[in-house]
């Protein structure tokens, strides 16, 4: 607030529902979203195997590739809808207690941006949609482990452990110059939507790397499930 006043901006105009929703979006994307998508991704295949319904499904004329692909698509749709719902919920509850107005974004990575109402809504909408890329990647990681012969809880825990370990190591000052090698660095590309101007080249780089991660998860998951003995 003092920083806003020092720059000549009125706090009353920028401490708004949109600003609060953006602040709420940060812990949602860092804590709740990974947990939800990893939980669903870990259950997609492993839960079917644990309940014994996987053998019944494969007794029908359906290929293993098609089965796991359909499950991945279902998980991806869930991930996108979850990101959108969490963004809408953040705005809805923030609007109950705070007035409408501009957007003041103070986010990790040294981002300090101020937007008027129209541009603020655009940035928030684009960032919320971009979070779905992070959600799909983490869901795909849990889905990959779910294709192994392990319990659903183990698949979820493995995905969350990789996410948390990558983030912890990334934040160590010694590895600051190597941040671009960590998965979580690219998962946070949605934060750059609040920069002025938007660094589309950097966002495109992170998006392409995440695309490679997702393709790798998909190939490994399909390969493991294809050679897996379902009868055991």
Image (tube, rainbow, N blue to C red):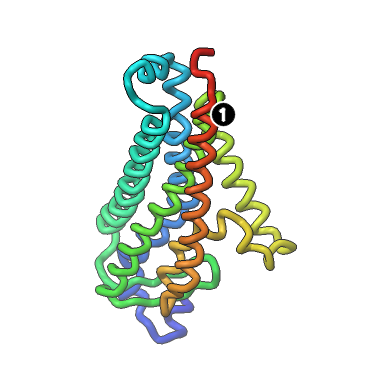
Residue in view at x 31 percent, y 51 percent: 84
Q: Nearer the viewer, residue 66 or 167?
A: 66
Q: Please, what secondary structure does the residue beneath circle 1 have?
A: helix
Q: Position of residue 122 (x, y in %)?
A: 29, 69
Point out the image quarter for the C terminus.
Answer: top right
Point out the image quarter for the N terminus.
Answer: bottom left
On the rendered structure, is 178 left or right of 140? right
- Rendered position, 46 above or below 122: above
Q: Nearer the viewer, residue 86 or 170?
A: 170
Residue extending farthest to the bottom is 8
Q: Which residue is mark 1?
A: 154
Residue in view at x 28 percent, y 53 percent: 88
Residue extending farthest to the right is 174
On the rendered structure, is 50 left or right of 98? right
Q: Position of residue 47 (x, y in %)?
A: 44, 23
Residue in view at x 31 percent, y 71 percent: 120
Q: Nearer the viewer, residue 54 or 190?
A: 54
Residue in view at x 59 percent, y 46 percent: 164
On the rendered structure, is 56 left or right of 211? left
- Rendered position, 130 above or below 117: above
Determine the image quadrant of residue 74: top left
- Rendered position, 212 above or below 109: above
């Amino acid at each position: 607030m003092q920083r806003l006043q020092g720059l000549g901006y009125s706090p009353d105009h920028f401490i708004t529902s949109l600003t609060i929703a953006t602040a709420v979006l940060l812990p949602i994307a860092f804590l709740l979203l990974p947990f939800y998508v990893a939980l669903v991704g870990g259950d997609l295949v492993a839960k079917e195997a644990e309940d014994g319904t996987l053998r019944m499904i494969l007794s029908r004329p359906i290929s293993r590739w098609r089965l796991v692909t359909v499950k991945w698509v279902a998980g991806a749709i869930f991930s996108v809808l979850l990101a959108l719902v969490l963004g809408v919920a953040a705005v809805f509850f923030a609007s109950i207690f705070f007035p409408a107005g501009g957007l003041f974004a103070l986010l990790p990575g040294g981002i300090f941006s101020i937007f008027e109402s129209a541009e603020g809504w655009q940035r928030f909408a684009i960032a919320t949609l971009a979070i779905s890329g992070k959600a799909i990647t983490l869901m795909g990681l849990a889905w990959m482990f779910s294709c192994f012969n392990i319990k659903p809880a183990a698949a979820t825990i493995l995905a969350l452990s990789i996410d948390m370990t990558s983030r912890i190591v990334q934040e160590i000052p010694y590895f600051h110059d190597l941040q671009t090698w960590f998965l979580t660095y690219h998962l946070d590309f949605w934060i750059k939507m609040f920069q002025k101007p938007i660094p589309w080249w950097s966002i495109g780089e992170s998006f392409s790397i995440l695309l490679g991660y997702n393709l790798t998860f998909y190939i490994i998951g399909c390969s493991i499930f294809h050679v897996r003995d379902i009868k055991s």
